[in-house]
Each structure stands twice: as structure tokens, then as C-alpha cells.
Amino acid sequence: MPVPVLHAVLFDMDGTLVDTEGLWWEAVEHVAGRVLTEADRPEVLGRAVEDTAAWLAGTAGAAEADRLAAALHHEFDTRVRGGVEVRPGALDLLAALARDGVPTALVTASPRPVADTVLAALGALGAPAFAVSVTADDTERTKPEPDPYLAACRALGVEPAYCVAVEDTPTGVGSAEAAGCAVLAVPSVAPIPPAPGRTVLDSLAEVTPDRLRAMTHQSMTERQEGGRLRVMSWNLWLGGAFVDDHRAKQLAAIRASGADVVGLQETGGTATKELADALGWHHHTAGENLGILSRHPIVARFGDPEVGFYGAAGVRIRLGGPETPGAREVDVWTAHLHYTPYGPYEADLDGLAAAELVAHEEVRRGQLADALDRIAAASATGGDGVRPVVLVGDFNAPSHLDRTDVPWPVSLAAEAAGLRDSYREAHPDPVRAPGHTWSPVHPVHPEEGAHAGRPEPQDRIDYVLHDGRGLRVLDSRTLVLGTPTPWPDVAANTWPSDHAAVVTTFAL
């Protein structure tokens, strides 16, 4: 039996290590000037101060939200300085992890000054120092987004799949699970149900490092035996060559994503094999541009192996080893469609009418139709034809689910073929969750000509689609590590691409 691996343990702060949820609740009540109710919990617990302040401000505007945020900071900090109560078992667990040499990190949605106050209080009580601390001030997005946990793993140099995050709220649990961590939930106020990869306990009392190791082992076993599948789509930007040390940064991004399968575009010919060799994964390379990485065995390969720069390629993966009873198979395809003419430019910068925009999608629509034909033919081979299908890729085309004023034919054709958009399943409202993947490094148009210097349309053109046969979307996120410096000063960026990646977690 494999030895369980535990790379690190990542602790939430408020309500997990120290009992400050009550202090925060009191602070919000004081600033709101009213008694909070059960209906207020989602906007108060596990949220960043600025989120709660914006909720309290309502439609009053940014100035009022800023005033309320400052008041919340003051009220909460005053209460914390008055003394905090440590949650049962917290100090013992931190000490046991230190004795075993397991790194720990503090990952909180509280601001840095509050976190430092609590860290000082814990230190005074004899708690070992954390190797890393990540606060609301340290990432662009905080919980429930995965960014804080990804930042902690990156700082520690560990893979999220081999880490346990300890959380007390549904918001925090969602953040940690989206980052790919196993989760130990110890609810402080709001209930949290058990789920795959998640353990729910009443307290930290009697939790040991060995129990946490067993959690990472169980979480990885569930993945290997086909209980969950995390799929990533990523355009590498001509192999990543514009960014220094790009191969190492690509590896760091894939590890941080927690992905099991990665569909690649713009591989530069060699990236797929080099990444697979470094990861110890299986791979399929097609032509100069497309590739698929898989931690699961590849049992079949589909499509033209000499496909050009645009087109599609696929594999069939087997979830679990040969000894796994009833092991399941999934077909995963990656596609890259032509970039010009580019619909968002013609819509936003040139003002073309809907009929012209649709007509100009004909090349991409034809490329997708060819990919869909290949997918259908492959699905009919080797069995009963009911195994799930996942299609990822850079389609270079908007979705009718986002830009609802135009019947964008590429996304409509995928939908007509029975493919569902996993990101929009997880985030139905395109206003609240636009999911832009183009472009984290291009705030203004990067090329010469009439569009030069104009604001670059930010759009969702990268997708993880699925046919729903035996698949259920648990979560879908865009992923960008760090805060990329805009083009052309990109060489030092942590993120080695001009696209955001899309990462979807499926239950099977």
C-alpha cells in the first residue's frame, strides 16, 4: 500500500484556529446598527471585509463602502486586541505538525494587520510559527476564489493535492476545494455537509498528522479510482517562449491547478512531452500545436497525428489502474480554432452588426464541425459508446451564453451537439462571473493598425465542455498565477501565457 503523503497543512484563521467569528459578527452588527439574522450569514461569515462592507453599503456607492470597510476593520481589530479564544485542539495539532516537520500556512480572508495581531496572540500562547501566511491583502481575489490557497501552496513549493486545508465555513471550503486541496471542515457556525475529498469533524481535538495524511491518501485514491476528474484547458502562448524560465512556470501552474488532465494548445512542438516527462504523466502530442497530459493511463489516441496549427486531437483515458474493478473511461479532446477574423474586435472596436459577426464565424464553425465529427466517430469505437466526452480548447470565439445579443455560431454548434459549458454551469450569471480568459497580459490592443492603443476586449474564449454522460460539474474556475505585467514587459511574469486557463472539477 502506498505511504500516505502530506506536503503541508493550510489553516484558516477566524473560527478555525481562534474563535473570532463571534467577534466579527459583533463588529458587523455594531457597524450595521442592527441585529444580524440567519439570512445575513452568507454575506458576513467567511467573506473579506470589503465584501461585507459593499453588501452593507448596498447602492450607496464606493465611498460609503470604503467608509464601512474602515469602520469594520476598526471594530474587529479592537475586539481581537481584547483577547482571542483558541479553538479546541488547535494548539496541540500545530505542535504535533511541527514535531513531524510538516509545514503549515495561515490562509485567511482577514487583512494583514488583523492576521498579524492574531499570529502574535497565538505565538504568545506557544503556537509554532507558520512557514507562510496569506491574507486578503496578498492576492487580487480572496475566498471563495482559490487564489489564497494556490498562493500558499506556491510559496511553500507544494502540490495542493497533497495538502489538507482546515476550514470552518462553506466559503472557505469552496476556496480550498477549488484549489485542489483535501479539506478538513470543522464548522463553527454554518453547517458543512461531507463530500468527496472532504472530512467533517466537530473539533480539532484528537486530530493527528497521521489522520491528515490519511485524508490526502483518500482524496488521491478517489481521483485515481475515478470518483473525481479535474480537467484544465490552457493555451501556452507559442510554447511560452515570451516568458523567462517558462517551462518551470508551466509546471508550477499545472501542479497548482490540481488537474488530472490538461488539454494544451500552442505547445511549440515540444512542450507536451517535456511537461509529461517532468510530471511523470502520460501524454499525446498531435502536430506542432496540440497536446494532452494525463495522470491517468491513455488507452487510445484519436484524430490526425499530423494535425496542423488549427484542429483537434483526442485521447481515451482509463480512470484507475488495471486492478480497479469497473474502471471507467473518458474521451478527452483538445481543440484550437482560427483566430481571425476575431469577433470581439469586430463587435466592440468596429461596431459590426450581428449578421456580419455571425457570417465571419464560418471558418471556426467549420473547424468545430470537423472536430465534432471526429469526436462522434471516436465515441462509437471500443465499447457501447456511452463513455463521457470532454472537449477543451481555445475557440477564439465568444459564447452566446455571455454575449447574448449575438447568436455566436461556434458555441451554439457545440451546444447543438450536446456539449455543455462547464464554466457557465458553475457560474450561470455572466455579469457576476464573466470568466474572461483573454487576456491577462493585454489591457490594450497589442498590435499595430486602427485598433492600436484601444482597450482590448476582455472575453471568454477558452472552454471546458462536456456531454453530461456520467459527469457532473462540481466547480469551474479560471486560473492565473500572480499578477502578470502587461505586454510587452512579460519576461518576468509568474504566469507564462497570454490566456487564463480554465479548470473544471467533475464528479463521475
Image (spheres, rainbow, N blue to C red):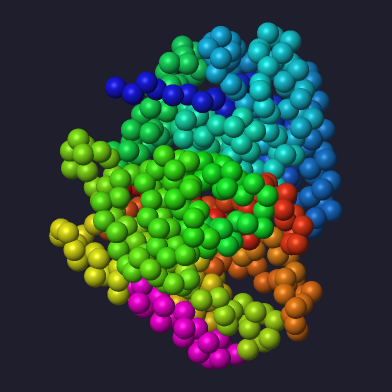
Q: Give the range drawn in magenta.
A: 353-372
Foreground residue among 57 and 411: 411
In magenta segment, residue 61: no
From what the image shows, is residue 98 above or below residue 266?
above
From what the image shows, is residue 284 above or below residue 209?
below
Say whether residue 490 is left or right of residue 152.
right
Say whether residue 166 is left or right of residue 136.
left
Q: How many labels does the image show?
A: 0
Question: What residue appears at the point 72 percent right and 20 percent down from the top-left corner?
Answer: 119
Q: Position of residue 136 (x, y in %)?
A: 71, 39
Residue projecting furthest to the left: 384
Name the image quarter holding residue 188: top right
Foreground residue among 347 and 447: 447
Magenta-drawn stretch, dominant element (helix, strand or loop) = helix
Question: What residue appears at the point 55 percent right and 76 percent down from the top-left corner?
Answer: 339
Q: Where is residue 270 in the image (x, y as percent from the top left)?
A: 49, 55
